Image (cartoon, rainbow, N blue to C red):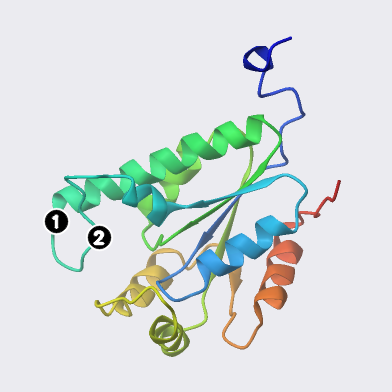
Amino acid sequence: MAWAEVPVDTKPPAAGAVLLTGIPGSGKSTVASALAARFAASAHIEVDALQELIVSGGHWPSPGQDDEADRQIFLRARNACLLADSFLAAGFLPVIDDVVVRRAHLDFYRTTLTGGPLHHVILAPGVTKARERNLARDKTLTTDWSFLETAMRDELADEEIWIDSAELTVGETVDAVLSATGLTPRRP
């Protein structure tokens, strides 16, 4: 059989997907990468990277009213779900990281990702720690996003998995995610 004829879904589907959310600086990308590395077959879907695929016409989220930026938030979430469903079907655990602070945004993920259960985890180190982390990283943020903490706590207060990672290492945060979701890392 030629390589082009090998179906991508010859392995059993993965046990589900993980959606790591929180405000900018909460550690989503770092923890998502470290979490994915614990599994024998996994993928890290960084939603900001999907936004960067837009060559022209892209609108990044902003504090002001921007209907096109709001539309693109859902576009990138849909694309993340399409990728996650594809990885799930091929036996890879997808770990998605995105800033999700509104109920409508989270509900969109829950209805659009159809390939398996979605384990939603909110990283919530607090505004002070997030700001400190933002100042220390290579990716410089020029906008103060701390107001998103209030929106997230108001709209997503009933979500089950909140991890205060302010004093946790990356490894300890990954351990907390695994414990809270019940996912078990697999090695080849």
Q: Is residue 93 above or below residue 65?
A: above
Mark 2 surroundings: few (<14), some (14-19) or many (≥20) residues within 10 A = some
| On-image quarter of the N terminus | top right
Q: Secondary structure at mark 2?
A: loop
Q: Nearer the viewer, residue 93 or 101?
A: 93
Residue 24 visible within the image: yes
Q: Is residue 133 left or right of residue 180?
A: left
The image shows residue 145 at horizontal and vertical percentages of 30, 76
Amino acid marked by disc 2: Pro
Q: Is residue 165 above or below residue 12?
A: below
Kindly identify which residue carries mark 2.
61
The image shows residue 141 at horizontal and vertical percentages of 31, 76
Q: Are discs 2 and 1 less than 8 Å apart at CB?
A: yes
Amino acid marked by disc 1: Asp
| Earlier sequence position, callout 2 versus callout 1 | 2
Instruction: Name the disc covering residue 66, or none.
Output: 1
